[in-house]
Image: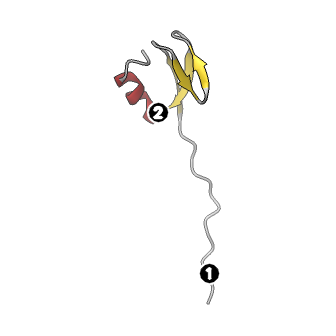
Amino acid sequence: MTEEPQSKTAPKPANRVKVKLRKKHRHQGKDYKPGQEIAVREDQVKWLKSHGIIE
């Protein structure tokens, strides 16, 4: 009995988008102030906007 080789491809990294903060926010363990920019995944933008955290 032989085993099928497993794929060695790494998952595709998520696209990042720079956003400007409207409120103070903690991102990846670091505190940021309003007006600062952070890079987030595209799928995080909608959540951050809906909570008034980004412009």
Q: Residue furthest bottom?
A: 1
Decide: is 22 above or below 40: above
Query: Which residue in the structure is indicated by mark 2?
Result: 42
- Tell which circle, 1 or 2, labels the residue nearer the N-terminal end: 1
Mark linked to residue 3: 1
In the rendered structure, which amino acid carries the disc numbered 2?
A: Glu
Decide: is 48 above or below 5: above
Q: Residue at x 59, y 30 (%)?
A: 28
Residue placed most toward the observer, 4 or 21: 21
| Residue 6 % position (x, y) | 61, 69
In the rendered structure, which amino acid carries the disc numbered 1?
A: Glu
Q: Residue at x 61, y 65 (%)?
A: 7
Residue placed most toward the observer, 13 or 51: 51
Marks 1/2: CA distance?
37 Å
Quadrant (top left, top right, bottom left, bottom right) of the C terminus = top left
Near mark 2 (Cα within 10 A), the count class, few <14, some 14-19 or many ≥20, is few
